[in-house]
């Protein structure tokens, strides 16, 4: 079981994100997962730096912690050959500590280049082909690729790591879980869905790593924590495929306007008591996930990491030892 820190680029400026990664390494966390967005979900989040620049900064300031995108969409806004180029360079700079998380993306980020927004089933096919192209380029030598969606001509990555970075695929439904099992080296999700993990493992993902994001808000006042989650991350209350379909932060602002705090923050661990966090972590583990990225909402990242070191990590270790007996 490994724990990481979720770096929400929608919330934090690039220098803060680099600082968070450095602090996560000092706190003994195994990895950081950083979101790859062109826009934040809502204007109140206020940030959206270019992920590959931030990863370069993290590489310069850390020496042990693994770093991965959560997640990059290599099918519209950026051609998969360019994503492969960025990922290979990141893997070299991080000396093998980089992993590439990919997914079918959101209209919010991808429509900006004016290439439209295909249906989900088409985006899944595009993602599968994009992964094939990226893996081909990671093998080195001059390559030409002509697929249904993508073309690369006489392309060669000269800057390559000793080993190709693993590709982990995001999934929230059964078809995406099967794609992740067949094309990826691991699974990424945001919900402790036992059925999703089961589908993934039956499709060939058994034994591969399974990553999940766990949103929380440590702080002295649970009520203030829930208010902060509702203010910054009301989009967690949106159901279905709406989060993949809306185009602009203003559209998300309108969609979340009717939502109450009970719709967006009631299930998020808050406060200073370790028990709600332990319960949420146990739900992730019981669903089959073996990598949990802790997403501390709001500006107090230092306070949360101190809480992790002082109270939550020892509590997790005691709980695991107790359950093992």
Image: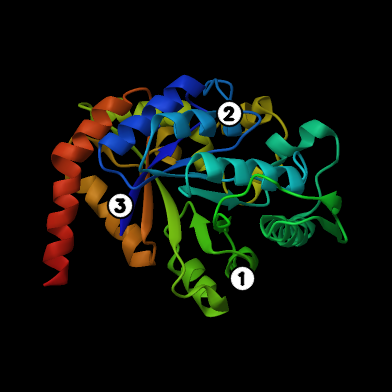
**Whether label 2 touches label 3, CB < 8 Å:** no
The one of 157 and 296 positioned closer to us in this rendering: 157
Query: Is residue 312 rendered to the left or right of residue 252?
Result: left
Q: Quadrant of residue 140?
A: bottom right
Where does label 3 land, which residue? 280
Give residue 43's position: percent from left, percent from top: 58, 21
Distance from Cα at disc 2 to Cα at disc 3: 32 Å
Q: Quadrant of residue 135?
A: bottom right
Between label 2 and label 3, give the one nearer the viewer.
Answer: 2
Mark 3: few/some/many CA within 10 Å (<14, 14-19, 20+): some
Residue 91 drawn above or below residue 233: below
The one of 183 and 146 positioned closer to us in this rendering: 146
Give residue 42's position: percent from left, percent from top: 58, 26
Q: In which quarter of the image is residue 174?
A: bottom right
Where does label 1 land, which residue? 178
Between label 1 and label 3, give the one nearer the viewer.
Answer: 1
| Badge 3 element | helix
Quadrant into which the C terminus falls: bottom left
Distance from Cα at disc 2 to Cα at disc 1: 32 Å
Residue 132 drawn above or below residue 207: above
The residue at the point 64 percent across, 67 percent down is 183
Q: State which tag comes first along the sequence, 2 or 3.
A: 2
Where does label 2 land, which residue? 53
The residue at the point 44 percent across, 63 percent down is 209
Q: Looking at the rendered structure, which numbered label has been put on residue 236?
A: none
């Amino acid at each position: 079981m490994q724990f990481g820190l979720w770096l929400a680029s929608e919330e934090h400026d690039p220098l803060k994100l680099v600082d968070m990664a450095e602090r996560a390494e000092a706190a003994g966390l195994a990895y950081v997962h950083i979101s790859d967005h062109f826009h934040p979900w809502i204007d109140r989040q206020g940030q959206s730096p270019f992920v590959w620049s931030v990863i370069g900064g993290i590489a310069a300031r850390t020496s042990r912690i693994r770093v991965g995108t959560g997640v990059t969409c290599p099918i519209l806004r950026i051609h998969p050959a360019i994503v492969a180029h960025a990922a290979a360079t990141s893997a070299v700079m991080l000396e093998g500590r980089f992993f590439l998380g990919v997914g079918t993306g959101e209209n919010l980020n991808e429509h900006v280049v004016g290439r439209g927004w295909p249906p989900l089933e088409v985006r899944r096919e595009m993602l599968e082909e994009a992964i094939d192209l990226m893996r081909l380029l990671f093998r080195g030598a001059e390559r030409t690729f002509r697929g249904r969606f993508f073309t690369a001509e006489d392309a060669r990555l000269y800057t390559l790591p000793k080993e190709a970075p693993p590709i982990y695929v995001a999934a929230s439904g059964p078809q995406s879980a099967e794609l992740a099992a067949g094309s990826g080296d691991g699974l990424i999700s945001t919900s402790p869905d036992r059925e999703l993990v089961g589908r993934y493992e039956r499709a060939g993902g058994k034994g591969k790593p399974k990553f999940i994001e766990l949103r929380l808000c440590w702080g002295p006042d649970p009520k203030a924590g829930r208010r902060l989650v509702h203010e910054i991350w009301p989009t967690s209350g949106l159901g279905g495929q709406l989060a993949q379909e809306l185009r602009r932060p203003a559209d998300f602002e309108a969609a979340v306007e009717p939502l109450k705090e009970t719709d967006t923050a009631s299930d998020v661990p808050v406060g200073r008591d370790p028990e709600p966090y332990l319960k949420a972590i146990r739900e992730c583990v019981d669903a089959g996930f073996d990598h949990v990225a802790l997403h501390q909402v709001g500006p107090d990242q230092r306070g949360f990491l101190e809480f992790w070191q002082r109270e939550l990590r020892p509590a997790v270790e005691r709980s695991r030892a107790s359950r093992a007996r």
